[in-house]
Image: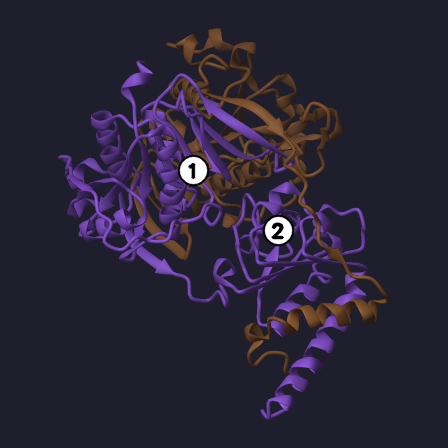
Amino acid sequence: MNLEEYSGVWVFIEEKNGEIAPVSLELLGAGRRLADKRDCKLSGILIGNNISHHAATVFEYGADTIYVYDQPIFNDYRTESYMKALLHCCEKYKPEIILYGATSTGKDLASAVATDLPTGLTADTTELDVEEDTGLLLASRPAFGGNIMATILCKKYRPQMATVRPKVMKALPPEIGRTGTLIREQILLNESDIRTKVLEIVTDTTKKVRIDEADIIVAGGKGLGSAEGFQLVHLLAETLGGAVGASRDVVEAGWIEHHHQVGQTGVTVTPKIYFAIGVSGAIQHLVGMRNSSLIIAINKDPEAAIFEACHYGIVGDAFEIVPLLVEQFKKSMAGEEVKHGGKV
Amino acid sequence: MLHIVACIKQVPDTKIIKMNPKTNTMDRASAPAILNPYDEHAVEEAVRIRERYGGTVSVLTMGPPPAVKAIKKCIAIGADEGYMISDRKFAGADTLATSYALTKALEKISQIKPVDLVICGKMTIDGDTGQVGPGIARRLDIPPLTSVKKVEEVNKQDGYVIVHRKIEDGHEVIQSSLPCLLSVEKEINEVPYASFPNMLKATRYDPHIWSVDDLEDVDIKQLGLKGSPTIVAKVWAPPKPEGGKVLEGNPAEKVEQLISVLLERKELFEGRGRA
């Protein structure tokens, strides 16, 4: 393989329900930085049905070029059809780097594409850099269950690929009117070539507050001792009007469902306030919440790593502190309403 | 009759493993080797499908000789047969080389008994990638179905499955032709305690163990470290963040200080705090 033939940074643009996934815009921000360092082009690759109009947005967020596969067969995301489009594009234009959001779609697609190319793929990356002269992608992620960070390289194969955690990279502010080159591509693909079919898409409306969209998150860890103890987290979340989060241990112990899990193997969150109660602060958890605006930790163990990652810490027994906090909070809010002439 | 193969891995329990702070490597002796928790669900789902439709459940792993223990655990869950590929030539494999080796083993298993369905756990807790399952599917040229949280129907006669695939805000109902590969979420099932007869069977069970030479058409260059495009260049402990302000005083005083911090952002709590 002649590595010199490969150039440019690509971002897979994920589109769903008529919108570009936020992680794709974040990756255009990260990709722009890599492309500038390499002095090469940043491109988006967009696959779907009636999606060409998104090109304008992709340019505004930093892309120089966009490759568009706009065909009815791409109406639903399916591994085999999307993979074929991507492989076609890779073969024709030979990118040096491809980034995907670490979403269910991005991870599914990247794994398939990596095998067929073949090339190396780093999963769930949280830090990205590139060597200016060699173009070597430095993709870092928490490893070994999140106990440590590792930098993964793919020296001899191109393109180099990584899936990147949502909400870790920053999108650039859109530059209105910024434009670029739109390249239309298509592949010959019949419905009978595709062995899967999406029969139905069911949107779950039962979840009260989606944890990745909440302004306030109250998260609990193994320090709460039991499923009963974890109720304390629900109590505080309810009082503050927040969503409930959990550490990996708690989910694995079965105290709460997986969609509440914050961290490397759960959801990445950036709320305005994040409470970590009885959470020790393993790297795997920290990477999922460290960009929160205000982090408050409550833990019995003064040595817990979470105290190094928080803005305010209380060393103490959650079973004493949290009920006091709930009570005081209710009192203060009632007081605020009186002050402002509201009803009590 | 259906033949379902679950791919499994023995992993160090990363929840309790200690890191060597000097070398930043895992101190494997500090944690027991367990069956990857996600794979328990893969095996359990295979067993449930067999219970519904009949057939055989095999498990396959790649690993050093002690990984036999993980196969025995699968037999205890209810698997019928266990296969293991074990060879120094497999060592140091990344996800691409791992999927290659497992595919070669699956091809051999298929010669013994054609495979209809391959099931993997969502990911392993030591690698955390979820890439091996889809990799196997591509190499076998069968559809990969990831993030599966429910198997609605398996119809061997008409050659299809219907599964629910978890997505960010709900799920998709997908039909796929058979054979195919599923990688399953934890929530797909609960793994009950092993039955006594299965436990007994597990203690007596000896898996089929193959080396590279037992597999056919193997391109040695695609195995192990040599066949792995990715390398871990360095491991490092992230710089410790500065740390915040630890609130002092008795519990009531601590809470009081915290309340004033919260009230600085009281617009977030509009209409909250009422009993």
Q: Percent x, y for residue A41?
A: 28, 34
Question: In the image, is residue B87 above or below residue A98?
Answer: above
Give the alpha-carbon distance from disc 1 to disc 2, as whole Å.
24 Å
Task: Specify whether B258 is left or right of A300.
Answer: left
The residue mark sitting in front, 1 or 2, is 1
Is residue B2 visible in the rendered structure shown here?
A: no
Disc 1 and disc 2 in contact, CB within 8 angstroms: no
Q: Chain of mark 1?
A: A
**Colour displayed for chain A in the image of the structure:** purple
Say yes or no: labels 1 and 2 on the same chain: yes
Mark 1 highlights which residue? Answer: A163
Q: Percent x, y for residue A89?
A: 22, 31
Mark 1 or mark 2: name the one nearer the start of the chain.
1
Question: In the image, is residue A133 above or below residue A141?
Answer: above
**Colour displayed for chain B in the image of the structure:** brown
Is residue A223 visible in the rendered structure shown here?
A: yes
Residue in front for this viewpoint, A286 or B254? B254
Task: Specify whether B257 is left or right of B265.
Answer: right
Q: Quadrant of the N terminus of chain A?
A: top left
Q: Chain of mark 2?
A: A
Q: Percent x, y for residue A142?
A: 57, 36
Secondary structure beneath label 2 = helix
Mark 2 highlights which residue? Answer: A251
Q: Percent x, y for residue A18?
A: 26, 57
Q: Which amino acid type is marked by label 1? A: Thr
Question: In the image, is residue B274 above or below residue B95?
Answer: below
- Circle 2: is it few (<14), some (14-19), or many (20+) Cα within 10 Å? many
